[in-house]
Image (tube, helix red, strand yellow):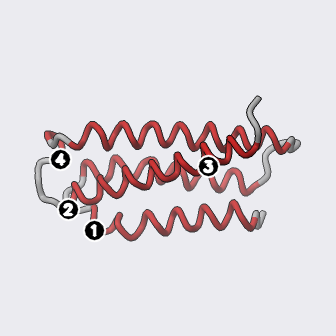
Amino acid sequence: MLSYEVYRFVHFLSIAFVITALGGAAVLSLSGENVKEHAAKKIIGITHGAGMIGVLVGGFGMLARLGLDGLPGWIYAKLGLWFVVGAVMGVAMRVPGAGKLLWFVVPLLVAVTGYIATAKPF
């Protein structure tokens, strides 16, 4: 089993990949071009998918190293918010002009998720 620090690095690096992909998707959505046929769609999708998997692997790896009995409520909140962040990619790629809203919503979702992870309010 890897150390807590390695899992945390994987988790944070993967978060960076997800945010980068969502930023790219938002810009692509704002460009007004046909998103379905754009050359950047594939790399954005791969980056997003790999990042989402890495977030889960790193996050659950950290939880395993903490040795908690069961999952506290803040974990369920983080999973729910990251599910929303994951679904945002579909919105960005399918709804023309959604990038403008996503440009501001995604950082808020990430900030709330970070707060929950840090403060562990429940």
Check disc 3 and report the residue beneath it: 79
Instruction: Answer left or right for 101 relative to 2.
Output: left
* Amino acid beneath label 3: Leu
N-term-proximal mark, 2 vs 1? 2
Q: Secondary structure at mark 1?
A: helix
* Amino acid beneath label 4: Val
Check disc 4 and report the residue beneath it: 35
Tag 3–tag 2 contact (CB < 8 Å): no
* Amino acid beneath label 2: Leu
Number of residues whose C-alpha sits closer than 10 Å to that of mark 1, classed few (under 14), some (14–19) or many (20 or more): some
Number of residues whose C-alpha sits closer than 10 Å to that of mark 2, classed few (under 14), some (14–19) or many (20 or more): some
Q: Residue at x 83, y 45 (%)?
A: 66
Check disc 1 and report the residue beneath it: 100
* Amino acid beneath label 1: Lys
Q: Residue at x 39, y 70 (%)?
A: 104
Give the CA separation, mark 4 to mark 1.
15 Å
Give the CA separation, mark 4 to mark 2.
10 Å
Tag 1–tag 3 contact (CB < 8 Å): no
Give the CA separation, mark 1 to mark 3.
25 Å
N-term-proximal mark, 4 vs 2? 2
Tag 2–tag 1 contact (CB < 8 Å): yes
N-term-proximal mark, 1 vs 3? 3
Instruction: Answer left or right for 22 relative to 122.
Output: left
Classify the position of the N terminus by image quarter. Answer: top right
Q: Is residue 96 above or below residue 79?
A: below
N-term-proximal mark, 3 vs 4? 4
Give the CA separation, mark 3 to mark 2.
28 Å
Check disc 2 and report the residue beneath it: 30
Number of residues whose C-alpha sits closer than 10 Å to that of mark 4, classed few (under 14), some (14–19) or many (20 or more): some
Q: Secondary structure at mark 3?
A: helix
